[in-house]
Every structure is written in C-alpha cells, then in structure tokens.
Amino acid sequence: MTDQENNNNISSNPFAALFGSLADAKQFAAIQKEQLKQQSVKDAMFNSLHILIDELPASPDDSDNSVSESLDEFDYSVAEISRSFRSQQEICEQLNINHMIQRIFLITLDNSDPSMKSGNGIPSRCVYLEEMAVELEDQDWLDMSNVEQITKVPENLLPFAVQCRNLTVSNTRTVLLTPEIYVDQNIHEQLVDLMLEAIQGAHFEDVTEFLEEVIEALILDEEVRTFPEVMIPVFDILLGRIKDLELCQILLYAYLDVLLYFTRQKDMAKVFVEYIQPKDPSNGQMYQKTLLGVILNISCLLKTAGVVENHAYFLNPSRSSPQEIKVQEANIHQFMAQFHEKIYQMLKNLLQLSPETKHCILSWLGNCLHANAGRTKIWANQMPEIFFQMYASDAFFLNLGAALLKLCQPFCKPRSSRLLTFNPTYCALKELNDEERKIKNVHMRGLDKETCLIPAMQEPKFPQSYNLVTENLALTEYTLYLGFHRLHDQMVKINQNLHRLQVAWRDAQQSSSPAADNLREQFERLMTIYLSTKTAMTEPQMLQNCLNLQVSMAVLLVQLAIGNEGSQPVELTFPLPDGYSSLAYVPEFFADNLGDFLIFLRRFADDILETSADSLEHVLHFITIFTGSIERMKNPHLRAKLAEVLEAVMPHLDQTPNPLLSSVFHRKRVFCNFQYAPQLAEALIKVFVDIEFTGDPHQFEQKFNYRRPMYPILRYMWETESYRESIKDLADYASKNLEAMNPPLFLRFLNLLMNDAIFLLDEAIQYLSKIKIQQIEKDRGEWDSLTPEARREKEAGLQMFGQLARFHNIMSNETIGTLAFLTSEIKSLFVHPFLAERIISMLNYFLQHLVGPKMGALKVKDFSEFDFKPQQLVSDICTIYLNLGDEENFCATVPKDGRSYSPTLFAQTVRVLKKINKPGNMIVAFSNLAERIKSLADLQQQEEETYADACDEFLDPIMSTLMSDPVVLPSSRVTVDRSTIARHLLSDQTDPFNRSPLTMDQIRPNTELKEKIQQWLTERKQQKEQLE
C-alpha cells in the first residue's frame, strides 16, 4: 500500500476523530507501522492466534500452556502469518462497536449495495441515517484495524452492549408511556406484532426477557401513565384480532401463546384479570364480550343459531363421503385438543401465580356462572332471540367446561384421597361479600337456591375456608350443567328433526313433489348443524376427562350416601348404614350431570364406554344405591333417569358376538359379575313401581317414557343367572306375603306391568284403527277436494296418529314380551286370584283383536312404519298361556272372562299360529290347552246357570260377580270380595268408596255373609241335582 493510499484510508477512518488533528493521526499510524515491522514472526503469529482463540467458544481442555507448546512445535511461513493476520482483522471487524450498533439498532451510515455488507456481520437491511452521513462525509479517518488493535475493542464490547440494551429499554418505556408523540404509528400494535414475530421465529424467550425489563421500567415510572393504562391498549388489540379468528387458524394459537406469557408474568396477569371484568356483571352475555370470553366463544359450532351461511365446517354434507366427514371431524378434534390445552394453561397460570390473581379469576368464573344460570330454564330454549341477548353461548360453556375438566384431573381418580376432601356444605352457603369470599375461598353464588338430593333437616356446620378441590368440583359441575347438558338436549332434538326431515324428503321424492328440493335444502342445513354440534361435543380427550370426573363423582356420592366423612374410601356393604345427611347439601345437578353424560356417550360416542368398562363398576354402585333409595334421592324423576343410565352402561342387547371386540366382553363381565346384583335388580323394580305416583300432574304420560329403558334391562337381567335368581326371590317373597299390610314389591310391580300392557296395547289398537280409516279416505281421493289448509290438517293428523301408534306399539311389545319371559319361571303369583283374572282378560282381549274378526281394522299399509308386530304379539300371548297352562286354577279362570273368551277365539289363534309358521310342538300344545279350557268352560256354564239368580247381597259391588271371600272395609263398611280389594290396593291404597287410607291388614272377613253364600250355593246345587 502506498503512502498516498494510506493517507486516504486514514482520512476516511471514523476513529481519526479520537486524535487532535489529522496530522497527529498520521504520525501515530506511522509509528505503529514501524513497530509492527520490528516484531518477530513468532510473536505476530502468537498474537493472531491468541485473538482468534479468545473469540472462539471455550473448550474444557483449553489452556495457555497447551497453546504455547503447540505454537513452538510449528515453523510458520510468511504466507501463513499473512492469512492469520487477515483472520484477525475480520474478527475485529465483526466485533467492532460500529457494526455492533448497526446490528442492535438496525441503523447505518453506509448506503452501499446490501449484498456487499452481509459478509462482515452488518445487517442486510438497516435504516440509513442520511443527514448524519452527509455531515460526516468530509472528515478524514484513521485506519480502523490499527486503532482497534491498540484499544483492544473486542475486550470492551460488553459494556457497550449493556448500554445499548439499557438505551433500548429506556426508549421502549418512553414510547409506551407517550405513544401520542409518535404520529401515524400504532405503538401497541407494533409490540403485539413483535411478540407474534418472536413466537413464530423461535425467538420468544429473548423477547420476553427484554419485555421483563421494559415492564419493570414501566412500573418504576408511573407518573405519566400507570402500568395498566399502558397495557390495556395491547389487550384491546388482542381482543379485536382474536374475535374474528376461527378454531382451525394457526394464527389463533400464536395469539394464545402471547396471552399465555401474559398470564405467567405477574404484573401483566394482574392487568389481564382486571381487564376481563365485564361492565355489567349481572348480564351473562357480557362475559362473552371480554377478552377471555372471546377466546372461549371460538368453536366449530355455528356463530349464529340456525345460520349456516359462511360457516367454516361441514357445508353441503350430502356431497361429502362418510370418510371425508370423518377426516374433517378428526382434524377439528386435533385443533380442539390444542385449544383446550391453551385455555387450561391460562387458567392454571392465573390460579397458581398469586393469591390476588387466583381470587380474581375465580370471582370472574363464579360471577359468570351465576349471571348465566338462566340458561337451564325451559323458556330459554323456547325463546332463542332473547336467550342470545342475555346469556353467553354454548361454545363459551363447552370450552370453559373442557378447560375446567383438565383442572380437575389430578383428583379425578376413584381412589383419590383428595377427592373425598370435597365439602358439600360449600353449596349451602348464603350470599357473602367479596372479602368473605376471598377468606373462605368461596366464589360460586346462588348454589344455596338449587334443589338438593334430599331436604336438609338441620343447618350445616360451615368450615373456616374451603379447599380448591371443593371449588373446582362445584365450578366444573355447574359449568357442565349450563353447557354440555343443554347441548345434549339440542343434539337429541336435532337428531329427531333430521329423522323426520329425511322421511319427508324421501316421501316427497317418491311422489315427485315440488317440495322435495326445499326439504333437501332444510336437511342439508340441519345436517351441517348436527355434524358441527356433534364434533364440538365429542373431542376424545374432553370426553375421557369428563368420564373420569363423572366416575369420580359416582364414587364421591356413594361415600356420602354411606356416611363417610373421612378422606379414605369405605367399602360398600348392604344393608346401607344410616348417616347420609351430607346429601342434603349436594345439588341435584351433580347426579343429573353424571346421568346425562353417560346417556350422551351411549347415543353419540359409545366407544368411550367400551374402552372404559372397568370404571363402570363405580357407576353401578351409584345406580344401585340411589335408584332404590328414596331416602337418599327424593326426586322420583331423577331416580327414574338412573334407569336410563343403567341401560346406557350395560352391554348392548343387539350386539353381535365378536371375539375381536374384547371391550364388549369386559362390559359384560363387569355387569354379569357385579357383586350387588340382587340389590341392583330390586332397585330397578322399586323405581318401576315408585314412578307410578310422582305427584306430577303429567305423571301418567311420563311413567311410560321412564319405564321404556327398564324393559331391555329386565330382559338382560333375566338372561343372566345371578339377576334372574334375585328376581325369582322377590317373587317368592311376594307369594308368601300377599296380604301383608304393605303389598310386596314384586306383586305391585306385576300389577303395574299388566296395567301398562292393557293400556298401551289398547291405545295402539285404537290409533291403528284411526290410521286405517284415514289411509282409506286418502286412497279414495276424498282429501283431494279439500282446501289446501284442510288437507294439511289431515296430513298432520295422520302423522300425529302414526307417531302415537308407533310409541304405543313399541311399549306394548316390550310389556307383553316381559310378561312372556317372567311367566316362564314365575307362576304362583300369576295364577293367584289377585292377578289371574286380570291377566286372562287382558290376553283374551288382545287375541280377539289380533286373530279374530276385528283384526281387519288393524291392517294398515306398512306395519313396520308404526312398529306394529302382530305376529310377535300373538306368539308372546300364546307363550304366556302355555307357561301358565299347567295350573288348574289358571285354566279354570279363563272361561270366566265373559267379555272376550270364546272357544272360537282359541281355534282362530291356532289357525294364526300355523299361518305364521310357529313350531309344531307349540301349536300342538296350544291346541291341547284350548280343548282343556273348553271342557272347563262347559262345566262353568252349567254352574252359572245354577247361580244366575243370586241376590245383590252376594255380588261384589265393583265387579258384579258372586263373592267367594267377602270382606268388610273398615272406613266405608262396604263388603267386597277379597280378590277385588286386593287388586285395587295394588294400585291405590285407599278405600274405593270414600278415598280413606286403606291397607290389607285393616280389612276384616265377613264371616257371616260368607257362610250365607256357601249355604246358598249348597242349596242351589242340591236343587239342581234333584231336578236332574
């Protein structure tokens, strides 16, 4: 390099400014150049390598001695020294202050081609400081490499870096405190974007470390603005951006990660919990408009009820294959699992961060649930336009429930000692002020107004405070009641409407009706709603967490029911011990949620039950205790619902045996090997009887719906030996105690079963007759001349009759089928005078309609449409006859049914049995029975002629038949036949003549009248013999 070139380089070097003049700088450079020439080759090499080694990462084996020794071993050439020196220059160049500042603040005085800068560590994109560059353009500078070697810049970079960092923090604080001075810039949006960029670029830890210092600086300087005032605009921006995002958008999860950081940072978390407080805490819908509420409202459910346009999921489902729908569902479930995890982590952070944030978030949750308590009211479902203005959405509560379920998982284990620390008196606390809630750890409100499992007989003893297990359980159960419970009801209704639409659409297509296209569109829309709702409710991890909770709740309620107040579970034994007063503080929705969820699984996610068979034993314990104990669960409707729960958890009756389905085997094993099978069978029969008298004005209609699931359960029990023997034991006890003060349970059960059979099949026959008439009218064209409105009324009436006929047919098939299998091994009760006449008159009446001349009135177009199964009914009725036909008393009673019996009836029945191809041995046996009954009928006919002129005193006032065992009723003093009053008391324990309470032990035999009747019978018999 020439002297002229060197002088030019010095004049352009920025470090020349460190000297008094350019001449001084040139003199200093010349001296240094001469000194460098005099250095030895070895020293130059050593210095070069020493700088290199200082800048490289340290190695565990590095030491000064090893470096010196290695240097002595080599003989370096001039070329090698030159290359080393150039390396030294490059390292210094990378570490010089000028370049460091450029990298930190992204500013530069160099406006050359960006591609020429990247090789020496200078950022490729910076802000060019044009004015400063012009100002410094005319000055001369020293050679940078010489100055850096003398001043040891690489060793002094750290203080400059710290100053840069402090300056950055200070400037950021200033920017955030006074954003108004930065015109046309949104400082808070830039901060949010910076955090998003850091998350997406894997530099989040660096950014959060920097933010910690900024937050600390902001808190130390609150003269201009308080820290919450600074940060609230950030939350405003997040709220505005998140509310328009969809569940399956990746960007959503970046924003949630930002919020997760905020809920971990103590100062930001305080601002967050204050920010999410609604303006009107009493308005449930306002919670949905908060930042946390906006997040909870994100779902695959429809944003606006009934509006599928612009919906992101399951549009035009009929154009998608089942596999495509399944794939979309699985994809949504993956996002849901991640989404619920994020919400759970946010709540967990706030609960664990500090007592203050814990109290705030629990207060928010408690107030939110209280403000939305009206979601469960009946009117809320009937007036959706008002509902959505007053309460938070279904998506809100579904997501909140999923997050709270995750919080409960640590103690949702059947043997968890923490589970039993739940204190039910929490639900009996009256209104508390905010300070009391904080001290007692009570944030739920209004639970004391909820109906509990049993009435409270005394005031509870409240503890000083409640643990988080108690609060979490109460919050989670009520959230599920407000959310999952309501959505389940909607799912059932949607499912029913889909079926009706499908039938109507198919009929319209077959008849080439112009309404077909409209029906198809309705079906598509409703199917979109159904698939979206089902997908939202069936995320696998949420369902498993909920099952864990409900099984644990079953364990908890069983322990409370047997009086266990300790933290370790007590073994269940029968008879149950006294001491269950804690149930008086347990709201009914705890048990209702349990039942509702298991029924949901059976309908829409049965595989979860299949894979969790071992945990179902705890559910069977719960059902056994509460179904059969009115002392522990007063509400008969809730107890009846447990029968449906039992049907849900037991193995499918129509399940095709398959050795590959091992989980089916496990469910069967759990049910069949249940330790308390006798108690479960008795509990089922008890609730069957108890729902006859619920006190509800609609109890008559309700009881048939409640009993519907009980029939398949009874059938399954009968097929399992342990349960069958238990039922037979109940029947034996009833046979030995027919005239007990309170009628035996099984006797009352059989009486009600026959009552149902008579009513249901009779109603079914009536509806089928009406349908037959209307179908004939329609086929003849009689409806064609009607006005459109009148024709629609006719169509609606026909549809209604069809639905009613179908329901009554289904239920009558079940009742007659139940009588058929019960009579196979239980006979004594059915042939007793208390029941024999009733069952015989019922069977004859139905045979008359099914095989006699009246059967033509029931021949509707499509039997299957109305679940009418006359062949099965005839077969079951004949089976009952054959099961009881060996009993002489039963056969003798058959001809006494003067309303329906005739020898011709049985001959017609034999003809039908042949026609429907029943087994030959069955036909022969029934033919023999018919002959035997006909012989007995002839004898009775002769006797009736003999006793035809009996006086009214000898006749039963209710049945108008000759009394065989007259008794006196204590209150009305009326004499009736013992069998007549016994049948009456099975259904109604009052005197039929004055409604006074009456039991069998209160009646007294009318011995005098009985002797008079017997004497009269003897005389009439003698007179007849004399005439013959």
Image (cartoon, rainbow, N blue to C red):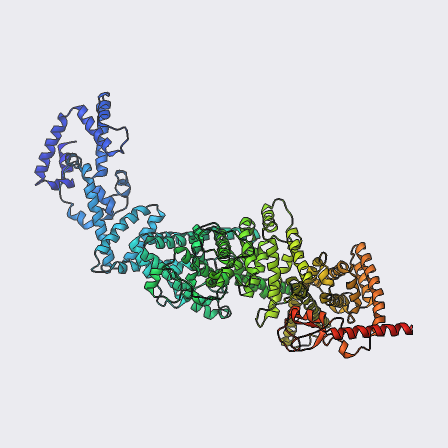
651 or 318: nearer the viewer = 651
User: Which residue, as the protein is rendered here, is positioned at the far right?
Assistant: 1028
Q: Is residue 427 above or below residue 190?
A: below
681 or 930: nearer the viewer = 681
Quarter-of-image position of residue 724: bottom right
Q: At 30% from the left edge and 49% from the top edge, which residue is drawn?
A: 208
788 relative position to 587: left or right: right
134 relative position to 447: left or right: left
Q: Is residue 1000 above or below residue 209?
A: below
Total numbered circles:
0
544 or 157: nearer the viewer = 544
Q: At 67% from the left edge and 56% from the top edge, which residue is drawn?
A: 728
- The percent position of residue 599, horizontal first and vertical second, equals 55, 58
114 or 991: nearer the viewer = 991
- The percent position of residue 330, horizontal first and vertical second, equals 50, 51
- The percent position of residue 726, horizontal first and vertical second, equals 64, 55
Q: Inspect this view and state whether residue 420 appears.
A: yes
846 relative position to 972: left or right: right
Instruction: Tell me the quadrant of the picture where the N terminus can be found.
Output: top left
- The percent position of residue 770, horizontal first and vertical second, equals 70, 72
Instruction: Tell me the quadrant of the picture where the C terminus can be found.
Output: bottom right
Quarter-of-image position of residue 689: bottom right
Quarter-of-image position of residue 1020: bottom right
Q: Inspect this view and state whether residue 308 appears.
A: no
